[in-house]
Image (tube, grey):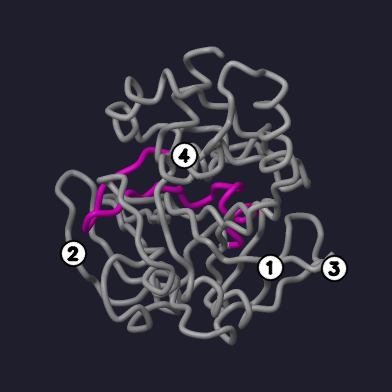
Amino acid sequence: MKSEKILRALTDLPDDMVEEAAQRRRHPLVRAAALAACLLMAAVSLTPLLSALLPHGDSGGAANRPHPGLTYQGAVYQLWDEGDTAAADRLALPQTVPDQLIGSRLDAIPDCGDVYAYAPLEGRTGHSPAALYLLQRADGTWQYMVFAGFSDSAYVEGDTLLLFYGVTSGADIQSLHPIGEPERAIDPQTFVDALTAAQVCGTQDFYRTVFAGTDWDNEAELTAKENAVFANSEILRLETVTGIVSYPTYYPAVGCLEWMQGYYDTGPLLPP
C-alpha cells in the first residue's frame, strides 16, 4: 500500500470533491501496521480539506484561480471571489453579491477585510460559526466565506452541524439527493431526525470500525471490504432554503454519513 494512500485514509480530512456528475469516490485501504505512525499526522494539513469544495475541470475565468482559506471563530473558510463562475455553479450563489444577501457587519479580520452576516442565515444559527459569511475587501469588492471544516480537525454532533446551516427541521432543507440524481431524493425530515440522533466519530475511529477483524495481509479480503463499504458510496447534494449548498458523502453499506470531518451513524437514508 502506497504511503500517500495510507495517509489519506487515516486523516480527518475528506478527499477532493468530485464533479457534479455522479462519479463515485473510492477510499484507499488502510493497514494496521501504518496506523500508529499516521495518527499524529492526521490533522497536520488543511490542504485536502480546503480542496474538498473546489470544482474539477475548467470553469473559466476566476474559477481557475486558487481559493485561499482563512480561519474565523474556530472554523476554516474558503474565499470565493465575486465573478467566480464556480460559485454560481457549485455553490448556487450569485456571481455578484447582491445587497439583499448582505447582513450585519460582524467583525474585521486584519489584512483581510470586514466580515458580514449572510442575510438569509442571520439569526438562524443561534451561535457561531455559521456555514456562510460575506467578506468585504478594502477595495470594496466582496468574497463569499464558505465553511470548509474546523481548524482543529474537530467534529461536532449532528444537531450542532445542522445549526451551522440554519437547519432546525426538514422544512429548512430545499433539496437533498445524490448528485445528478434528483429522482432519488431523501426526505428532509428523515435526514434531520437521523442526523440529530446519530452517533458521531472521527475518521480514525470510523476506519477502525470498518476494518475491524480484517486480515491486513490478505489483499483479497481488504479489497472485498473496501468494495463492500466504499465502492457504492453516494455523494449527496444538500441545499438549504437559505441557498447554502453542501456535499456530504453517504455509505449505504454501513449506514454512515461523512460530513465536515464527522462520520454520522444515520442508518438507511436513500431509497432503492
Residue 269: which numbered mark, if any?
1
Mark 2 or 1: in front is 1
Residue 208: which numbered mark, if any?
4
Q: Please tell me in which quadrant of the rendered image residue 252 appears.
A: bottom right
* First along the sequence among labels 4 and 3: 3
The reply to whether the magenta stretch includes residue 90 is: yes
Q: Position of residue 239 (x, y in %)?
A: 60, 68
**The residue tagged with tag 2: helix, strand or loop?**
strand
Q: Position of residue 5 (x, y in %)?
A: 53, 21
Amino acid carrying label 3: it is Glu
Amino acid carrying label 4: it is Arg
**Is residue 175 left or right of 1 when viewed as pictured?**
right
The residue positioned 42% from the left and 49% from the top of the image is 261
* Image: 27 above or below 83: above
**The residue tagged with tag 1: helix, strand or loop?**
loop
Magenta segment boundaries in residue numbering: 67-92
Q: Position of residue 185 (x, y in %)?
A: 76, 70
* First along the sequence among labels 3 and 2: 2
Residue that carries the numbered disc 2 in the rendered image: 107
Could you classify mark 1 by the number of other residues whose Cα lies within 10 Å: few (under 14), some (14-19), or many (20 or more)?
some
Most distant residue in the left direction: 110
Task: Say which of 103 and 154 sits in front.
Answer: 154
Q: Are marks 3 and 2 in contact (CB under 8 Å)?
A: no
For marks 4 and 1, give the CA distance: 23 Å
Most distant residue in the top direction: 2
Mark 4 or 3: in front is 4
Residue that carries the numbered disc 3 in the rendered image: 183
Task: Say which of 9 and 89 sits in front.
Answer: 9
**Is residue 214 left or right of 182 when viewed as pictured?**
left
Q: Position of residue 125 (x, y in %)?
A: 35, 78
